[in-house]
Amino acid sequence: MIFSVWAPNAKAVDLVVGEQRFALESLADGHWQIDVAADTRQGYRYSIDGAAPVPDPRSRWQPEGVHGASHVIAAEALKAGPPETEPRGSGEFRPVPLGEAIIYELHIGTFTPEGTYAAAQGKLAYLSELGVTHVELMPLAAFPGRRGWGYDGVDLFAPFPAYGTPSQLAAFVRACHSEGLAVLLDVVYNHLGPDGNYLAQFAPYFTDRYKTGWGAAINYDGPQSDEVRLFVIDNALMWLRNYGFDGLRLDAVHAIFSFEAVHVLEELSIAVKALGKELGRPLLLIAESDLNDPRLIRPPSRGGYGLDAHWEDDFHHAIHRYFTGETEGYYADFHGLQDVAASLRDGYVYQGQHSVHRGRRHGRPPLGVEPQQLVVSAQNHDQIGNRAQGERLSMMLNVPQLKAVAALTLLAPFVPLLFQGEEWGAETPFLYFTDHEDPDLGRRVAEGRSREFSAFRWQGAVPNPQEADTFERSKLNWSELSAPRHAELLEWYRRLIGIRRDKVVLPRESSADCAKAVTNFDAEAGWLTFVHNGVLAVFNFADLAQTVPRPGGEWNLVLRSDSTDTQTSDAQASDAVSPRSTLIYIGG
């Protein structure tokens, strides 16, 4: 078996298998290699210049955790999992285009009581029936301990062992495809976590020229950065090729520092498109970014990076500010219903104007940006979990407000993303939780979380991320589905998703301009309407009934939040709109 590792500054590299050591041969390009018939069933490590052995930077499996031995995973092992995890049926899977997508973000560890791939697989029929099209998994690259969000991963090629084996992960992806669900994976290429991070012992993977808020910046443009880029691109291609993922969500790309002529995101996009052609299936790259920068999704021929879409936070911030009234932190930049209307129309609220929160101008106009290139949400792991108490909107708003938020999200022109349990108004929090083995690091993480929330002045102590109870409290309570309030919300989401599927998806040849929503609102009176692709949404946010102007034409009422009766005549529907209600019409 051939073992190879990149360690350009090392004087000697040994493969360590149990008590045995095998010296690797130095190659001209900084790689070291050996072909040895060693029994690696108990795992292996590398020793650099006689130092203590550490895991392989490209380890495919760390069953004993990030400090344990690395294990080899044969490609054949990912093709068939244990019988109990195998999906029913087979066949060629083709995901729906991004313009027709509804993404459902979930965290494997808290999505079910068991917190495993196999248990999550048992909920796929529910997700398919709900009407979502894409499942997005929070990061899986191995991170320390037995629980966590995954954004402090250190073994990028090895799935987190507490969720299941690599073959069970591959079986989960196949099961999603069997249910008609595409699968996206959240990956973190802007930093690595501190606990179990041995990369710096091998090569200059990091740089001190830039700083991130979470750890050392990755060396994408300094000396020896070509190999660092290859490391990250190979990782992305592995998830897509070996496990069958249909796309990747790139965490916090504004913290990826790359100032060469070809940005690393552009290079990644080129490589992923080439793999898609090789495999004969579309592969997506969706960036998380708070820059309001169209360059992320413009093609390289127009000076862009060629990504497929990016998260658009202004939509969330405008909706959250309006419905909760919170004005702390970045919510200070948003001022009410006019920003909700702007976000429905353009996605970007900030297009170059001054941001009070940032103390500078922010964003640029989204010229040429197609609606399917913006992913929007009213709730996601960040916006819930980065609150002191992990509160969901269901813990802050009433049912009529939650229904309005759902309609704004699911009927907007953009790609909607739901966070696990949002669809039934789950009342379990989603808190930030960790399991660092180093108690000093755990203490510093807890203290850092408290400092991070100082700008928001939220009430109550921040739960200790290191305590197991913080994790357990974040698990979904599926028994809530039997309660009338939750069942009512779930049915509302299902019907909105059905309307979106049948009416709102973008025409294949539409342009950004013709696909825009047409909005009208009166901030003082508290009403808003928007029209998009033959669907009219009418919102009366006031506590009194009032007449809300509608655009001309024939409109048929198909859904209303204040009644299960959708057979109301058009004449009746044109009268005063009930307080705190949402009406959905289809053009006649």
Image: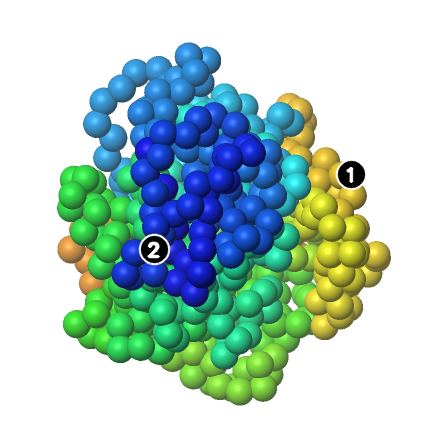
In the depicted structure, whether residue 520 falls above or below residue 68: below
What is the three-letter code of the residue carrying label 2?
A: Ser
Outermost top residue: 83
Residue 498 located left or right of residue 99: right
Q: Is residue 59 above or below residue 478?
A: below
| For discs 2 and 1, the disc positioned in front in the rendered view | 2
Say what secondary structure mark 2 lies in.
Answer: strand
Residue shown at the point (64%, 27%) measured from the top left: 113
- Residue 518 shows in this picture: no
| Quarter of the rendering containing residue 519 | bottom left
Q: Which residue is mark 1?
A: 469
Horizontal relation, residue 400 to residue 361: left or right: right
Image spot of residue 218 (x, y percent): 46, 66
Q: What's the mark number on residue 26?
A: 2
Residue 320 on image: x %, y %? 60, 61
The amino acid pointed to by label 1 is: Asp
Depth check: 188 or 505 in front? 188
Question: Quadrant of the image for the N terminus?
Answer: top left
- Which quadrant of the figure has residue 268? bottom left
Locate the C terminus by quadrant. Answer: top left
Residue 224 seen in the figure: yes
Residue 322 pos. (x, y %): 60, 64
Between 110 and 490, the residue placed more toward the observer is 110
Q: Residues within 10 Å of mark 1 (few under 14, many from 20)?
A: few
Q: Which mark is residue 229?
A: none
